[in-house]
Amino acid sequence: MTTQTPERKIKRSRVLSISERNRTAEDTIENIQDEYGLSFSQAVFHGIREYDRLRRKIQNHDWAIVREML
């Protein structure tokens, strides 16, 4: 008897609409693009990973005052 695994349909595209309120975030993404030579989507995910890394670094810091900044 053979087992068949169902094929997964992976959604690989997203549409990002940037409102007036988030124009500064778009500028930050463009700065990351220029600094690291990344595409728009690569820069978005780079920024997310960097944010996550810094947040964990602060949470694990020994100084209580630094943790309170979160």
Image (spheres, helix red, strand yellow):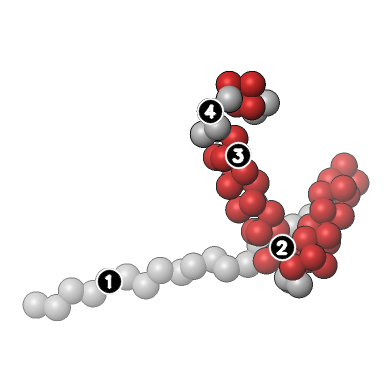
In this rendering, does residue 68 appear at all?
Answer: no
Mark earlier in primary sequence (4, 1): 1
Q: Quadrant of the N terminus?
A: bottom left
Q: Position of residue 8 (x, y in %)?
A: 40, 69
> Marks 4 and 3: which is nearer the front?
4
Sequence-wise, the earlier of marks 1 and 2 is 1
Labels 4 & 3 near each other (Cβ < 8 A): no
Measured in 3D between alpha carbons, the distance from the residue under mark 3 to the one under mark 1, in whole angstroms, is 38 Å
Q: Amino acid at mark 4?
A: Asp
Residue that protrudes farthest toward the left in the picture: 1
Mark toward the viewer: 4 or 1: 4
Determine crowd level at label 4: few under 14, some 14-19, many 20+ residues with C-alpha closer than 10 A.
Answer: few
User: Label 3: how many residues lie within 10 Å, few (<14), some (14-19) or many (20+)?
Assistant: some
Query: Which residue is the site of mark 1?
Result: 5
Q: Residue furthest bottom?
A: 2
Q: CA distance from mark 4 to mark 2?
A: 31 Å
Residue type at numbered disc 1: Thr
Image side of residue 10 versus residue 19, left or right? left
Residue 32 is left or right of residue 27, and the answer is left
**Residue identifier under label 2:** 43
Which label lies toward us, 1 or 2?
A: 2
